[in-house]
Amino acid sequence: MANYNSSNTNRRLKASSDKVRIMSEVIDFTATTTANSGDTFDAIGIPANTLVMSAGVDVLVADTAGNSGTIAIGDSGDPDQYVNEVAPTAVGQKDLLVAPEAYSAGDDIRLTIGTGAINGKVRVWATMISLDKDGSDEDTDSMNVTFA
């Protein structure tokens, strides 16, 4: 089992973080050393205090080697939070689970391979919004109002 981490370590949403952001990364399994069952790919960084409204996978190039591998989209705590295991044998978007998640700590949108090898190419995507517009994207903010 191998754990692949994206070279993009940015966990900050872009300016005006009170707007919905769509983030995506392409994973070409032919560029890895044969992705196998149990391998994980941390594709998209999730900043602390972020709501991930949905995440998914679009198969750009189907697995053509007759491999038995499946892919799931989730995070470090639930490998299929957003997409149950699916075989990437046909191009297109895969069925999503309606499973929004609020993250108080940083995490990653993670692709997990199950049951066998994969050789195709996919785009992993997520729709996110910051829950901490004027804050630091960490739980270190102080109160800026008073209560009577």
Image (cartoon, rainbow, N blue to C red):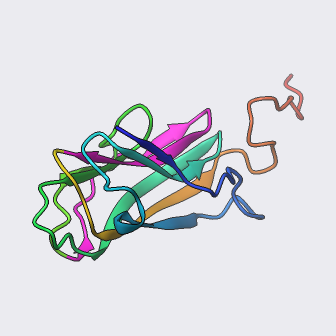
User: What's the magenta region?
Assistant: 91-114
Q: Considering the image in quadrants, where does the N terminus appear?
A: top left
Going 52% across and 45% down the picture, which residue do you hit?
108
Going 83% across and 32% down the picture, which residue do you hit?
141
* Residue 3 appears left or right of 22: left
How far across and down, in percent of the image, does residue 134 sit? 81, 49
Q: Residue furthest front?
A: 33
Q: Residue furthest top?
A: 148
33 vs 38, nearest the viewer: 33
Was residue 79 drawn as part of the magenta stretch in this picture? no
Q: Considering the image in quadrants, where does the C terminus appear?
A: top right
21 vs 134, nearest the viewer: 21
* Residue 104 appears left or right of 139: left
How far across and down, in percent of the image, does residue 85 sit? 20, 49
How far across and down, in percent of the image, does residue 118 sit? 24, 59
How far across and down, in percent of the image, does residue 40 sit? 39, 44
54 vs 7, nearest the viewer: 7
* Residue 62 appears left or right of 129: left
